[in-house]
Amino acid sequence: MNKDELLNNQALNQQILFFDPLCKRPRFETVNGTPSIHYVDEKQGVRALDFGKAEFNFFAPDAKSVRVVGWGGSMPESYDLHPVGDGYWQAVAENIAPGFHYCDFEVDGVRTVNPLAPIGYGGFRPVNYFEMPGEDAAFWLLQDVPHGTVHMELYNCRMTGRTRCCYVYTPPSYGKDSEKRYPVLYIQHGGGETEMGWLWQGKINYICDNGIAAGTMEEMIVVMNDGYAFRPDGLGDPAGGDIDDVLADECVPFIDSRYRTFASPRKRALAGLSMGGMQANAGMFKHSGCFANIGIFSGGFRDKGFNFDGSAFLKDPDSFRNAFELAFVAVGEQEQPSCDKLRESISEYNRRGIPLILYIYPGYHEWDVWRHAAREFMTKLFKGGE
């Protein structure tokens, strides 16, 4: 992709509310005594003008002040917007790091959601975000390649006593060959987000579409679940819940019954970011007979924790290799002190013959790191036999 294609890609403004934002509002008028309606263009809430340069807009005719506030990490700054006419406030900011950015808009000191900008769910609330493309953004953007399909599936969960929702990506070839079977990646969101995070914030479907088209990753099904799975009796993990149990005991059998999958741990992967990474870490050792491929993104790496203990695997390289096809740990270079601690601990495990792979990408505890981690993980997945 050239620069113009990156800066104007449709995926930059896609969100839960719109696939292609309307960016128009109705205007009602009376012409010659007859009521009429037509649409007028609105300003985009956030628009990438150039690499590192963005325009912020907010419609607030009666406001006295408007500000956009970054969440820290790669966007620590705040920017004051100024009136530009017709009720709009605007600011142009430069030197914004490439990648995904959550941000808050404050009107007269009150935090609010900008309806003109993409809206997601993060930090346990609806929140605005925007994308700043960089030269390497093409892998997660919308490209002219065959596209897979995202399905919404509902299944009963015995553990929680509730119906659960998961989103399932099937690759472009699914359905063309009624005999073909596919490996499955179960991938989890982080704390404060939902099962829709990997679709709208992570762009996982485009990462898959583009990777499959480029031949850099195997065709696979991807399953995204709500990570908040707590036992009604309160006996589960009070911090991370027990989504690993739900996946292994309930979601995997459901997906295997609905889709053409391989019923083999070597053809299943469990991954997640932050909280989801910690859940994958637990599931790695609790359910090694279900998942033989593990991806932990910004979730650290522990040998034991609530209701799991992987010490036996980590003391015996042969046992570890027999259980796990791929064990991948990722972290942002600026996630300190986690990054340095992982360098040291993974190096020690490697010295003892435990084949953990450490992937470090420049960045903070943010989606830009996790997108790159997911792509790198998926390029290594399912390369062996059944």
Image: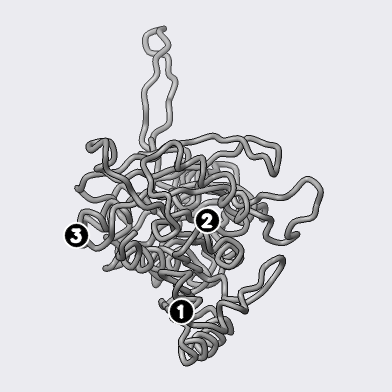
Pick the residue in front: 206 or 122.
Answer: 206
Q: Are marks 3 and 1 in contact (CB under 8 Å)?
A: no
Nearest to N terminus: mark 2 or mark 1: 2
Nearest to N terminus: mark 3 or mark 1: 3
Q: CA distance from mark 3 to mark 2?
A: 29 Å
Instruction: Give the amino acid type for the residue marked by disc 3 in the picture.
Output: Met
Left or right: 185 in relation to 240: left
- Which percent across, then down, holds residue 173? 24, 42
Which residue is the site of mark 1? 356
Which residue is the site of mark 2? 188
- Placement of the C terminus among the 4 image quadrants: bottom left
Pick the residue in front: 193 or 41.
Answer: 193
- Which percent across, then down, holds residue 111? 64, 52
Q: CA distance from mark 2 to mark 1?
A: 20 Å
Whether residue 55 is visible, yes or no, is no
Give me the residue at 63% from left, 53% from top: 245
Instruction: Give the amino acid type for the residue marked by disc 2 in the picture.
Output: Gln
Which residue is the site of mark 3? 1
From this view, report whether residue 116 is shown above or below residue 360: above
Nearest to N terminus: mark 3 or mark 2: 3
- Badge 1 element: strand
Left or right: 332 in relation to 53: right
- Which percent across, then down, holds residue 333? 47, 81
- The label nearer to you, 3 versus 2, is 2
- Which percent across, then down, holds residue 375? 35, 64
From this view, report whether residue 237 is shown above or below residue 310: above
Instruction: Give the amino acid type for the residue marked by disc 1 in the picture.
Output: Leu
